[in-house]
Image (cartoon, helix red, strand yellow):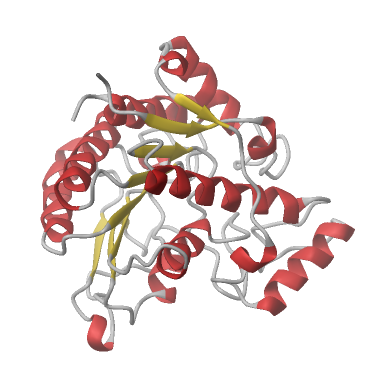
Amino acid sequence: MPTPVCVTVGDELARYGFGEGHPFGPDRLGAFWTEAQARGLDQQLIQCPPGSAGRDAIERFHTPGYVARVLRQSASGEGYLDSGDTPAFPGIYDAACCVVGSVLDAIERILDGECRHAFVPIAGLHHARRDSAAGFCVFNDCGIAIETLRLQYGLQRIAYVDIDAHHGDGVFYSFEDDADLIFADMHEDGRFLYPGTGREEETGTGNARATKLNIPMPPGSGDEQFYPAWQRLEDFIDGYCPEFILFQCGADSIAGDPITHLRYTPAAHRHAAQRLKCLAEKHCQGRLLAMGGGGYNRDNLAQAWTAVVEALLEPA
């Protein structure tokens, strides 16, 4: 029998977007789900409604002052939540809480044994810092997930893996000195792409030194460059025996994305999901949560995310 996989779908989750024509528009979830249905995946999955996180959960990671600011600008719908990438819109607070709530609901379903793996397509907002938005990301659901796994479930050694074209800076710098957060990120070299961070020399600080792996990829890197770099990442994660794996599988690293310069195919995303699934089975009872992350070519994200889900559905 295929491994049970939960996937979050619903109009509430799709509302996290910045308007038609914006790279991060509200049509991204629909693009994925249309392709998933065309492949018959909807008949094999546990379909889960979106959740909604309360302020207490948001503030496990974010500062109260920043959360209050998002609430104010959500009411007015005016201005930016950062220096110019992340515009406010009426209801943005509730939309961002839905992303976080959906991730936390998926974690609960995994740890309760309803499923072994889960995928939340509109999630993986890895740029937001504890006190600010950044790069289309209002609340950092990845960071909130890490804090929740610790505070609510008592897990400590969490692995965060990221193959989005952009460096997961909001996660990295928030846990740079945390030896129990195992961080591994393959991304386009920051000399050529936002946010300009994630140098190979950045391996963590203090007691956390060597618990972080950044692999900057040259612009134009394709699958031929992906696979050896991935093996290095996989060996790194394997060495730390995590208790839970978070996987940010941004599709903006696929060839043809309008704002990045990597050239992977969806086979790379499938391979990453397959291998992380094996590591999850080996170390943490299958506990693997995938989050959609970036991806601004709609066909690319549909192909990459369905490849991830297909890999999660395969028998262990």
Quarter of the picture holding the N terminus = top left
Look at 21% across and 35% down and name the residue there: 274
The single residue placed furthest to the front in the displayed view is 112
Q: Nearer the viewer, residue 99 or 215?
A: 99
- Picture quadrant of residue 173: bottom left
Look at 66% across and 53% down and name the residue there: 97
Position of 304 relative to 87 (above/below): above
Q: Is residue 258 left or right of residue 263?
A: right
The single residue placed furthest to the bottom in the displayed view is 206
Percent of width and height locating residue 43:
44, 13
Percent of width and height locating residue 252:
42, 41
Quarter of the picture holding the C terminus = top left
Position of 229 relative to 227 (above/below): below
Q: Is residue 49 left or right of residue 248?
A: right
Asked whether residue 261 is in view, the answer is no
- Picture quadrant of residue 49: top right
Position of 33 relative to 72 (above/below): above
- Picture quadrant of residue 191: bottom left
